[in-house]
Image: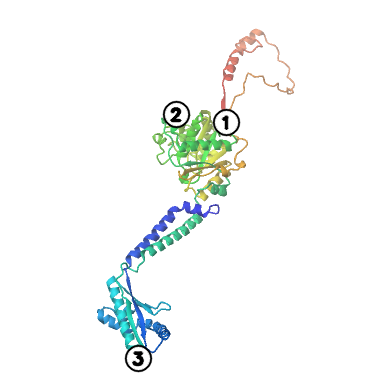
């Protein structure tokens, strides 16, 4: 999370944010449409003061001093009880008091009386009735002395055209804001506790390895399609092979081990993609299935249940019988087989089996884990110098990646880098900016299993240094030639008959090469 900006976090967790927004807006809509509508109507009263002996200023001063006290009378029983009686309302004084309010705008002699009701017509009736009741009360208690006070209905209350509550737009807006806030918090929490691999920076931080290539989601080009119809997946695997070659000092490894980081990254399609890229370069590629697949892998489906690696390890078959052509490719494949084999048996015969593999193909590709059978990382490690870690985008976790890399290093296999698979097509990952010069070796890794030419027996050998011989015993008494001939049943001659030996040596020296294991 430390290497990601907030914008990147929100972009990756957009689905969580969307869900939170939908929940927030949906909850707000449920609240807004479940509340009964309330209508508010307002009547305006004007305070009039008359006195023939008072000046205009005196009347205004008296009006401003008295008008504030009248707003408190609106909620009194003296005003509300006549309203309940006149309108025959099924309400108590306390209930009606909660629906009525009065305000006095500053520096005016107006009184605004607002009434709330479940219908627009009732709201207008209550507001006008309260205004009339207040006017009668004020006229009764204030008309004494020299001043004549009256409250006149300046603006009568009218039925409103729309409810005053609930304010659905405001509630929906609040729900939207709340959903966005909750989604942002949820995205940050997911980023904090979610350790799945998505970025080259994540891989570098956990293992120190580079991401050599990113393979998008999709399918490889089917055999028989036009060459121009190469898919982005084929191009990605071709780029992956080029980067593997560069990371290995410019040489394609003879035995290329793919180590998946977690069960979700363990799929034969990755190995088949690499094998197809090798075959596209003109090299003879051989895919060796380290473990029988439990899913339909397409190109290997029709070879299920046939002899393979297990039978080779048990020495019950030959490579010629189990090496089969791969569908949609010029490469060969050897399936895992069906026979049961033990680790002891595999350790004894694996050298010769791998020797036959690399004698048949230029590049041998296999995908194995520490628990795969019949071939596993511990079994292959003595014969494999480098490996590629396969990480599935948004599925492989930090722990799975770290565990796989540790297993390779403990076994003595150097991981060259990471192959990121199943990347969304809309996701563009810039890899070159993440590479360092240390990611690419200057020399290829030394292979443990390779081809070596047999020495020519006809070539002159260096003269051996003579060793001192012990003193010879006295020679026996000589025998006659005829006796020697009869005893040995061959002519008595000092020259050996080596014509047949020379012919056999010539035949043996004509062998081109043999496979040896260091």
**Where does residue 197 sit, x and y in percent of width and height?**
50, 48
- Secondary structure beneath disc 1? strand
Q: Which residue is mark 2?
A: 321
**Where does residue 439 sit, x and y in percent of width and height?**
59, 41
Q: Can residue 94 be seen in the rendering of this structure?
A: no
* Marks 2 and 3 in Cβ contact (< 8 Å): no
Q: Which residue is mark 3?
A: 144
Q: Nearer the viewer, mark 3 or mark 1?
A: 3
Q: Earlier in the sequence, mark 3 or mark 1?
A: 3
- Quarter assignment of residue 130: bottom left
The residue drawn where x is 43% and y is 55% is 16
Quadrant occupied by the C terminus = top right
The residues tagged by marks 1 and 2 sit, at their Cα atoms, a distance apart of 22 Å
> Seen in the image, is 390 located left or right of residue 306?
right
Please tell me whether residue 113 is drawn above or below residue 212 in the rendered image: below
> Seen in the image, is 431 located left or right of residue 223?
right
Q: Tag 2: Cα neighbours inside 10 Å, few (<14), some, or many (≥20)?
A: few
Q: Which mark is residue 450?
A: 1
The residue drawn where x is 52% and y is 50% is 398
Q: Earlier in the sequence, mark 1 or mark 2?
A: 2
Q: Nearer the viewer, residue 201 or 311?
A: 201
Q: Nearer the viewer, residue 251 or 467?
A: 251
- Secondary structure beneath disc 2? helix
Q: Can residue 184 be seen in the rendering of this structure?
A: yes
The residues tagged by marks 2 and 3 sit, at their Cα atoms, a distance apart of 125 Å
- Farthest bottom residue in view: 145
Q: Nearer the viewer, residue 371 or 237?
A: 237
């Amino acid at each position: 999370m430390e290497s990601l900006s907030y914008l990147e976090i929100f972009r990756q967790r957009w689905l969580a944010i969307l869900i939170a927004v939908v929940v927030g807006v949906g909850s707000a809509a449920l609240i807004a449409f479940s509340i009964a509508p309330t209508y508010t109507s307002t009547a305006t009263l004007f305070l009039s003061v008359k006195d023939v002996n008072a000046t205009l200023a005196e009347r205004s001063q008296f009006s401003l001093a008295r008008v504030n006290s009248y707003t408190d009378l609106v909620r009194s029983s003296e005003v509300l009880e006549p309203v309940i009686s006149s309108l025959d309302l099924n309400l108590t004084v306390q209930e009606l008091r909660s629906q009525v309010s009065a305000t006095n705008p500053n520096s005016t002699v107006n009184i605004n009386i607002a009434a709330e009701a479940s219908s627009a017509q009732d709201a207008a009736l209550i507001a006008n009735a309260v205004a009339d009741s207040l006017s009668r009360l004020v006229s009764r208690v204030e008309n004494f002395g020299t001043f004549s006070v009256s409250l006149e209905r300046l603006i009568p209350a009218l039925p409103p055209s729309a409810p005053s509550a609930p304010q659905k737009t405001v509630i929906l807006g609040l729900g939207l804001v709340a959903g966005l806030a909750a989604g942002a918090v949820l995205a940050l929490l997911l980023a904090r506790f979610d350790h799945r691999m998505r970025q080259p920076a994540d891989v570098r931080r956990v293992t120190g390895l580079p991401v050599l290539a990113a393979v998008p989601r999709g399918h490889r080009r089917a055999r028989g399609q036009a060459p121009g119809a190469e898919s982005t997946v084929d191009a990605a695997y071709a780029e992956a092979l080029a980067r593997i070659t560069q990371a290995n000092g410019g040489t394609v490894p003879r035995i290329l081990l793919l180590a998946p980081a977690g069960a979700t990254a363990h799929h034969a399609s990755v190995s088949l993609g690499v094998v197809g890229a090798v075959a596209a370069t003109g090299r003879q590629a051989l895919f060796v299935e380290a473990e029988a697949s439990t899913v339909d892998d397409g190109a290997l489906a029709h070879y299920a249940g046939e002899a393979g690696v297990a039978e080779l390890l048990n020495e019950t078959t030959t490579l010629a019988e189990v090496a089969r052509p791969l569908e949609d490719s010029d490469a060969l494949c050897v399936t895992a087989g069906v026979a049961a084999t033990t680790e002891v048996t595999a350790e004894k015969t694996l050298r010769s089996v791998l020797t036959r593999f690399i004698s048949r193909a230029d590049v041998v590709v296999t995908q194995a884990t520490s628990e795969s059978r019949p071939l596993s990382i511990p079994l292959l490690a003595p014969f494999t110098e480098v490996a590629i870690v396969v990480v599935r985008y948004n599925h492989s976790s930090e722990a799975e990646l770290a565990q796989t890399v540790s297993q390779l290093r403990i076994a003595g296999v150097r991981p060259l880098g990471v192959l990121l698979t199943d990347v969304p097509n809309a996701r563009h990952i810039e890899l070159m900016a993440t590479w360092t010069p240390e990611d690419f070796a200057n020399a290829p890794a030394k292979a443990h299993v390779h081809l070596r030419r047999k020495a020519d027996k006809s070539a002159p050998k260096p003269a051996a240094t003579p060793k001192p011989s012990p003193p010879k015993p006295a020679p026996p008494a000589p025998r006659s030639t005829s006796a020697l001939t009869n005893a040995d049943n061959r002519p008595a001659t000092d020259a050996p008959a080596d014509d047949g030996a020379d012919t056999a040596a010539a035949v043996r020296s004509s062998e081109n090469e043999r496979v040896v294991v260091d």
